Image (cartoon, grey):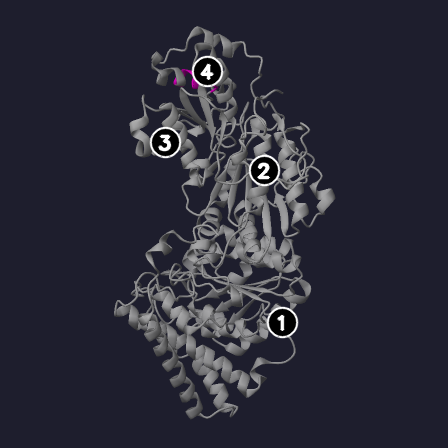
Amino acid sequence: MKTSAAKLAASRAARPPADPGRSSDLPGPKLLEIYRTMVRLRKFEERCYQVYLQRKIGGFCHIYSGQEAVAVGMISLLGPQDYVITAYRDHGQALARGLSVKACMAELYGKATGCSRGKGGSMHFFDTSVRFMGGHGIVGAHVPLACGIGWAIKHQDQKGVCLCFFGDGAMNQGAVHEALNLASLYKLPVVFVCENNGYAMGTAVARGAAEENIYLRANSYKMPTCRVDGNNLFEVMDVTGGLIRRAREEFQPSFVEAVTYRFRGHSMSDPGSYRTREEVDAHKARDPIAQVAQHILKQKHAASGDLDEIDAEESASVEESVKFAEESPPPSPDALYEDIYA
Amino acid sequence: MSVPVSRRAGVPARHAEPAAPGDISDAVRMRAFRQAINEALHEAMARDDRTFIMGEGVDDPKLIFGSTAGLKERFGPERVFDIPLSENGMTGVIIGAALAGMRPIMTHQRIDFTLYAMDQIANHAAKRCYASGGRQSVPITIRALVGCGWGQGPQHSQSLQSVFAHIPGLKVVMPSSAYDAKGLLISSIEDNNPVIFIEHRRLYEIEDDVPDGHYKVPLGRGVVKCEGKDVTVVAVSLMVFESIRARQALAEAGIDAEIVDPRTIKPLDVNLILESVRKTGRLVIVDTAWKTCGFSAEIAALAAEECFGALKAPIRRVTLPDVPTPTTSALEKIYYPGALDIARAACDVMGLGGKVPPAVEASIAGMTTPTAPQFFGPF
């Protein structure tokens, strides 16, 4: 059965030509590294889900499971000079950018050892040492910040790119459209990535947007726009690689709609009653991690035992992070009054 | 124009940061507020090539009422430029640029337009340092003008300092003189935090003794503009000017008012204000904005909480009435308070029952010191 989201993913009419060289031909070790990162995201998120239900953590928690090919595929194309900025579903991007599993888990536990010293929480992971400019809690509002980062890259001759992730719901925010115009007007090295997982909380795309083909809405800003299958790692990487190159070399911004699906609800409080079991199952059958695993096995880059080993190692690392977070100290009471000003 | 405040007469040494030897000459150098702002921008931008200034109209022929004159010629169009009508988006741009190492300055011809960018200012610029556990900061300066004068109307005349000051993480600066404007703007641009720098349009042509070169007036430090023993008048921005006029007139009735200018709304120089109230035992607060939940309420609460025992009379506030700004000049005249209203409040706390002695009233009516220049347009 093909769901409407899968149909959207299959429509690639707007795709720009990819640069020569296909990511599916990447050498085995590189592919295995990417696979490992995708597994890390999944293990981390599923463990978050459990500790949340055990009430060891609370507050907001938006699980990224199912969308791994987007964050990992795109961020694996970046170098240390590049920037990543994202919305509130930020655990995946943070881990893909290399934040430590421990610092992320401790942040969810609200501990002083967290990546934002416990003062940011799930929606506000930050690590400037890897130019991870954070998760943001106001839908679409961080998209103009990406333009500012692009501005700084361009005017400080940093030769980088800013990868800016946001969801389908953000496309209905004025700030996003202002940002798209400004990026194109000022020729800023930003690649805008709309992760279309079909729903803004419980609102299906077509219920919030007169034009449900999201990439078409970006067409009026005079930049390359396209749609990719966000569950297909290689398609994500092939298309984004060319866009990142053009941003770095030509200050050409661009827009990618990555059609994907979240396996869990919008947040922990979401029973997901707006989606049918059949729809969710159909998407789980297109699991991005399983697709990569199949490719690796088919190309004989590794045996299934090797992949199992990677899974086990990542599970163990997440387990260690839970222990680390639970044993870490909370921020001292003084921290309440610290960091109001720099 | 003669205004009885200069860095020598009005600013005790302890409130100014020492200048490097040779930086500031002793010669009196009168400059308008508008020119002082312009000089601050020149100084700050020459010192640090990470700064850039943008906003609607920064390089158009009017140059934000003259305050951005000569900048584009000196620093080039990449550092001084006009922007599209996207206040919200462009505020996000300066925040992002600041996070990535730059020190942007944004200019709004009216503070009313910053409301478009309130999400960026309140949710992003203000909160970044805290939410990142101190690992990031947002060194931006947002200049915003308060309109006042014929026909500005309800959407071009608001004085929104209290709105910004309510939000943790922002600094809010409101200079009342050209000297302070230059030193405070340089401090704001060199500060590592988001600063809302509020300039009252009717101060723009008022001159003061403004040193040449680079100097800073520290943020968070107020100043006693004029010493007095009978009543403390805490006033901000244009209202400092009106309060000084009122003080001159009150002297006719033997009332000696002390004028305290906080200069920075947030962080607030609490001790300076309390020290003065403890000395005089009487407090009048004069604001350019509305009364309800405003800056004047904050100062009144502060005095009530911290030095209630020192107060000899109830606190009085002189503010705008809680109504939108009328566009017609017929109503504007009674909307804006002035020296006479301040004198009336001072007489009230002095126990004169709200009656202004005829000598005081006559003094204000016949004042040779002109009121701040009116603003007739064209706009």
Q: Badge 4 is on which residue?
A: B340
Mark nearest the camera among 2 and 4 is 2
Q: Is residue A49 magenta?
A: no
Q: Which mark is on residue B183?
A: 2
Asked if residue B144 lies left or right of residue B269, the reply is right
What SS does tag 2 mark? helix
Q: Residues within 10 Å of mark 2 (few under 14, many from 20)?
A: many
Q: Chain of mark 4?
A: B
Q: Secondary structure at mark 4?
A: helix
Residue B297, numbered label:
3
**Is A202 rendered above or below residue B240?**
below
Residue A150 image point, x, y percent: 60, 59
Identify the amino acid type marked 4: Leu
| Cα separation between marks 4 and 1 | 69 Å
Query: In the picture, which quadrant includes the N terminus of chain A?
Result: bottom left
Q: State whether residue B349 is above or below residue A172.
A: above
Amino acid residing under circle 3: Ala
Q: Secondary structure at mark 3?
A: helix
Q: Are marks 4 and 3 in contact (CB under 8 Å)?
A: no
- Chain designation of label 1: A
Between B311 and B345, the one nearer to me in the picture: B311
What's the chain of the residue with tag 2?
Answer: B
* Badge nearest the viewer, 2 or 1: 2
Q: Which of labels 4 and 1 is toward the front? A: 4
